[in-house]
Image (cartoon, helix red, strand yellow):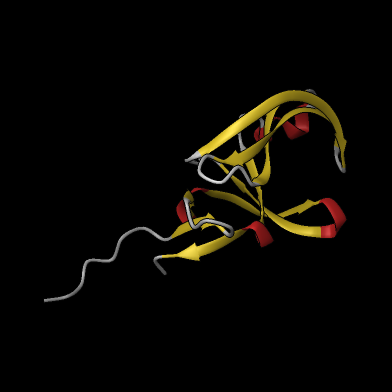
Amino acid sequence: MADVIGPRLYACYNCRNHVALHDDIVSKRFMAGHRQRAFLFSHVMNLVAGPKKDRQLITGWYTIADVECSDCGEVLGWRYEKVNEESQKYKESKTVLEKFKIVKDNW
């Protein structure tokens, strides 16, 4: 009998708390601070959003909230709360996680 394979997950690099499913990646072509690669996710889990703030990013001004692991409190990325530029609206209500702060789990 074959082993049942579950979904491919990403976890917090610090405590291994599951934070996202591989299937929920919208784009792998994002950049975080200091030219770090990042992924845009349509859905995330086990994260807590901080206060909303306006921040200038590479593609313009956004209202964002940093997101942290619900277990250890490590900031893993940010959530786009409000997007003003029409061409960037696809980012609204989605979350960016920095690649170096998440690890593959169940692959």
Which residue: 83% across, 51% down? 33
Q: Position of residue 13 (x, y in %)?
A: 58, 60
Q: Position of residue 104 (x, y in %)?
A: 51, 65
Q: Position of residue 62 (x, y in %)?
A: 80, 28
Q: Quadrant of the N terminus?
A: bottom left
Q: Is residue 79 above or below residue 53?
A: below
Question: Visible in this render: residue 84?
Answer: yes
Indicate left or right for 53 with 10 as reference: right
Q: Quadrant of the C terminus?
A: bottom left
Which residue: 67% across, 29% down? 50
Farthest bottom residue? 1
The quadrant in which residue 34 appears is: bottom right
Question: Visible in this render: residue 82?
Answer: no
Indicate left or right for 56 with 5 as reference: right
The quadrant in which residue 90 appears is: top right
Which residue: 73% across, 23% down? 52
Q: How many marks?
A: 0
